[in-house]
Image: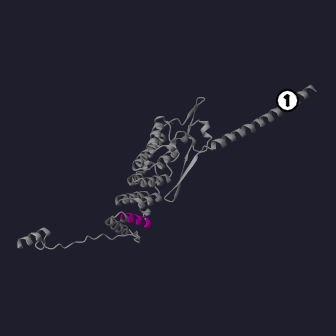
C-alpha cells in the first residue's frame, strides 16, 4: 500500500500545481489586460517615453473645419505639461528645436499644433519652416540607423521601435489647415509656396487644397502656379471643366482680365470648356477727353491778362 499512497500523493501534488498555475495565469492575464486598457488611454504618447504617470492620462482632441473638411489633432498630457498649448508659434518652434538637439523626435500632432497657432504673416513663415524641418528629420531617420532614442537596451538586446519616417507623412488635411491659416494671417505667398513645395514640406496635395488656393489666391501668378501644380500631380486628364473654370475665374477675380481671356482660349483650344457665368471679363475702357488744339486752349490766367490789357 505504501507505493499506492506515494502515487496518490504525487497525483495530488501535480493536480495542486496545475490549479496553482492556472490561477496564477488568470491573475497575470487580468493584469495585462488592465495595463493595456490604461495605456490605450494615451494614444498620443510619444515613442520612447517611459513616463508611466502621463501615459494613463487621456489626450485632448482639438477639432476644426477647414474648407468644409474636419481636421483633428491630439494634445497629450505630456504636451500640456510642457506648456505647448499656451505657447506662441515662435515659442513652440524654439521648444521643438530643443527636442531635436536632445534627439527627441516631435510627432505629427506637434506640427498641427504649430499650424493652428498661426495668427500673423510671420507666424505662417515660421510654421512653414517648422514643418519642413520635421519632414527633413523624418527623412533622415528613415534613411539611417540612428534611432534618436526610439530604442532601448534591455538585458543586452536592442528593442527596435519603428522609425518615424515609416509612419507616413503629414495627414492630407494638414495642408488645408495650413493654407487657410496662412490666408487668414495675410500670407498668401506662404500658402501657395507650401503647396508648390509639398515635396519639401511633406504635405500631400489634394484637389480640395487646390480649390481653396484658387478661391483665395491674390494674383494671377499664384493662380497659374496652382494650375501647374495640379497638372503635374494628376496629369492632363486632371484638368477638366470645373478646374479650368476655377483657374480662369481666379484670374478674373484678381483683376487680370487679359490673363483670364488668354487662359480661357488655351483651355478651349485643348478641348476643355470654361463656364464664364458669373465672371466679369470686360476690361475697363479709358475715356479720352478732347482738350482741343493748342491754339484753342486758354488758361484762366491768360484770359485775365487779356482783359486787363483791353482796359
Where does label 1 land, which residue? 10
* Quarter containing the C terminus: bottom left
Residue 114 painted magenta: no
Q: In this image, 289 relative to 310: left or right?
A: right
Residue 176's place in the image compared with 85, above or below, is below
- Percent across and percent down for residue 174 are 49, 52
Q: In this image, 175 relative to 290: left or right?
A: right
Q: Residues within 10 Å of mark 1 (few under 14, many from 20)?
A: few
Residue 89's place in the image compared with 151, above or below, is below
Q: In this image, 22 relative to 232: left or right?
A: right
How many marks do you count on the picture?
1
* Residue extending furthest toward the front: 311
Q: Main secondary structure of the magenta part?
A: helix
Q: In this image, 131 relative to 292: left or right?
A: right
- Percent across and percent down for residue 292 are 15, 74
Residue 192's image quarter? bottom left
- Percent across and percent down for residue 80 are 55, 42
Magenta range is: 240-251
Residue 89's image quarter? top left
Q: Give 215 or 272, whichever is nearer the viewer.
A: 215
Q: Give 307 or 246, whichever is nearer the viewer.
A: 307
Q: Residue at x 8, y 70 (%)?
A: 308
- Can residue 138 be seen? yes
* Quarter containing the N terminus: top right
Residue 244 painted magenta: yes
Amino acid at each position: 500500500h505504501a507505493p499506492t499512497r506515494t502515487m496518490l500523493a504525487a497525483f495530488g501534488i501535480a493536480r495542486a500545481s496545475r490549479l496553482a498555475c492556472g490561477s496564477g495565469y488568470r491573475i497575470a492575464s487580468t493584469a495585462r489586460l488592465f495595463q493595456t486598457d490604461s495605456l490605450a488611454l494615451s494614444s498620443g504618447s510619444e515613442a520612447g517615453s517611459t513616463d508611466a504617470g502621463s501615459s494613463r492620462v487621456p489626450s485632448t482632441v482639438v477639432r476644426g473645419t477647414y474648407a468644409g473638411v474636419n481636421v483633428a489633432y491630439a494634445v497629450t498630457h505630456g504636451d500640456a505639461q510642457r506648456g505647448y498649448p499656451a505657447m506662441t508659434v515662435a515659442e513652440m518652434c524654439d521648444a521643438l528645436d530643443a527636442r531635436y538637439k536632445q534627439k527627441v523626435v516631435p510627432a505629427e500632432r506637434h506640427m498641427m499644433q504649430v499650424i493652428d497657432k498661426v495668427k500673423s504673416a510671420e507666424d505662417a513663415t515660421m510654421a512653414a519652416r517648422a514643418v519642413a524641418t520635421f519632414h527633413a528629420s523624418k527623412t533622415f531617420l528613415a534613411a539611417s540607423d540612428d534611432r534618436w532614442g526610439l530604442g532601448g537596451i534591455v538585458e543586452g538586446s536592442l528593442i527596435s521601435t519603428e522609425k518615424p519616417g515609416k509612419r507616413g507623412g503629414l495627414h492630407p488635411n494638414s495642408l488645408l489647415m495650413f493654407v487657410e491659416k496662412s490666408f487668414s494671417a495675410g500670407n498668401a505667398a506662404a500658402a501657395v509656396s507650401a503647396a508648390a513645395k509639398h515635396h519639401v514640406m511633406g504635405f500631400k496635395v489634394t484637389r480640395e487644397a487646390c480649390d481653396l488656393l484658387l478661391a483665395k489666391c491674390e494674383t494671377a501668378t499664384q493662380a497659374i502656379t496652382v494650375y501647374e501644380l495640379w497638372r503635374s500631380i494628376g496629369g492632363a486628364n486632371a484638368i477638366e471643366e470645373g478646374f479650368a473654370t476655377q483657374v480662369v475665374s481666379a484670374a478674373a477675380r484678381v483683376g487680370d482680365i487679359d490673363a483670364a481671356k488668354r487662359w480661357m482660349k488655351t483651355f478651349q483650344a485643348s478641348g476643355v470648356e470654361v463656364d464664364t457665368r458669373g465672371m466679369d471679363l470686360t476690361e475697363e475702357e479709358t475715356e479720352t477727353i478732347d482738350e482741343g488744339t493748342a491754339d484753342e486752349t486758354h488758361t484762366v490766367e491768360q484770359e485775365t491778362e487779356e482783359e486787363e490789357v483791353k482796359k
